[in-house]
Amino acid sequence: MPMRINHMELTFAEGTLTDTLKAEIQAFYKELFGWDGLEIDIVGQKALLLMLDSEVSQFILCAESPKPMSSPGLDHLGLLFDNRAEVDALLAKAKAMQASDSRVQIKEYEDLNESGTVVHAFYVRHLLPLWFDVQCIEYEAGSEPAKRWHFG
């Protein structure tokens, strides 16, 4: 049975997800990844929906909670891109954004070569309590998977 991720909820301490913070989150992720943001009323509060696709079938919900998320380590959500050029372009864009906003965090990694694959990636985090692992997976001849997921 095929499956995709529908959504992820990231929670913030009560009183911290202000209109200003929501606007900053929206602006950053729109510029970097093209995600549209939408303020919605849900569970008795105004939350922020970051839409990863135009159908709103994949989204990140930013909401407040009395028990907010804590991610002091490298907890992350992986974003898979088709090729190295796309990952490199996003890294360059993230670095340019970091130059004007010191709150943008970036972790660069050497390529990971393992079992016929090369993972080319970097991590980025800004204003959300989670890193995003921006990556592509390159396959050596004969190591390609039998099935691959593609946008239609």
Image (cartoon, helix red, strand yellow):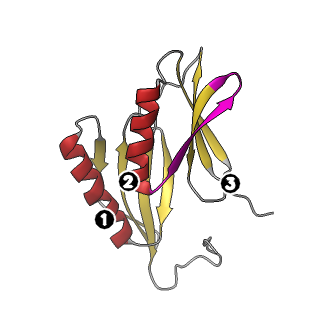
Q: Disc 1 to disc 2, how far (Cα)?
A: 12 Å
Residue occupying image coordinates x 24% and y 44%: 98
Amino acid tagged 3:
Ser
Residue 30 among those drawn in magenta: no
Residue occupying image coordinates x 47% and y 71%: 82
From what the image shows, is residue 134 above or below residue 42?
A: below
In this view of the protein, can residue 72 be seen by the observer? no
Q: Residue furthest bottom?
A: 141
Label of residue 57 in the image: 3
- Taking 124 as reference, is 77 left or right? right
Residue 35 among those drawn in magenta: yes
User: Of the residues tagged 3 and 1, which is closer to the observer?
Assistant: 3
Which residues, given as a range, are shown in magenta? 34-45
From what the image shows, is residue 72 above or below residue 106?
A: above
For mark 2, give the secondary structure: helix
In this view of the protein, can residue 105 be seen by the observer? yes
Residue 56 point in image, percent of width and height: 65, 53
Q: Residue tagged by mark 1?
A: 88
Q: Quadrant of the C terminus?
A: bottom right
Q: Disc 3 to disc 2, how far (Cα)?
A: 20 Å
Residue occupying image coordinates x 65% and y 76%: 147
Q: Residue tagged by mark 2?
A: 32
Residue 70 point in image, percent of width and height: 49, 24
